[in-house]
Amino acid sequence: MFEAVVVRKHKSNYPNPVSFVAGDALLVGERDSEYLGWVRVTDKRGDVGWAPLKYIELNGDGTGGVAIKFYSAKELDVEPGERLTVKYEHCQWCWVEHETKGAGWVPIECLENA
């Protein structure tokens, strides 16, 4: 965990982020070519988005799987100069907390250590 300052604006493109809990069945699609370690999934509500591949136990042909832990794809909209607490990093994205905006994912390239 460390403190960071936003150096580049980030706005989410996903108003309905995917989320799942351990045991949920998921449809699994393409692997992200920009952020390795992420895969496009469809959750039980039908929402589509990116999730860490390591959070999913894939079936034999890789087109489906079962979640092995909780995950939310909620991204946080941030502006330059805002201060965040980085809770953890995964494949070039950080799960952060903001004092008033709550928590969510932000690309690591939008941040610099405070």
Image (cartoon, helix red, strand yellow):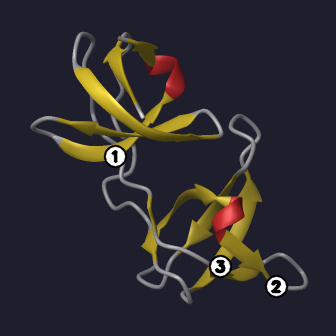
> Mark 1, mark 3: which one is toward the viewer?
1
Residue occupied by mark 1: 104
Q: CA distance from mark 1 to mark 2?
A: 28 Å
Q: Identity of the amino acid at label 1?
A: Gly
In the displayed structure, would residue 15 be above or below residue 20? above
Could you say where residue 88 lies in the image, as x and y percent from the top left?
49, 41
Residue occupied by mark 2: 59
- Give me the residue at 56% from left, 89% from top: 23
Sequence-earlier tag: 1 or 2:
2
Residue occupied by mark 3: 27
Sequence-earlier tag: 1 or 3:
3
Could you say where residue 20 lies in the image, as x and y percent from the top left?
46, 76
Horizontal side, residue 61 vs residue 86: left or right: right
Horizontal side, residue 28 vs residue 112: left or right: right
In the displayed structure, would residue 28 be above or below residue 100? below
Horizontal side, residue 24 vs residue 105: left or right: right
Horizontal side, residue 13 vs residue 65: left or right: left
Q: CA distance from mark 3 to mark 2?
A: 10 Å
Q: CA distance from mark 1 to mark 3?
A: 23 Å
Q: Secondary structure at mark 3?
A: strand
In the displayed structure, would residue 108 be above or below residue 37? above
Per the rendering, the mark at residue 22 is none
Could you say where residue 12 lies in the image, as x and y percent from the top left?
36, 40
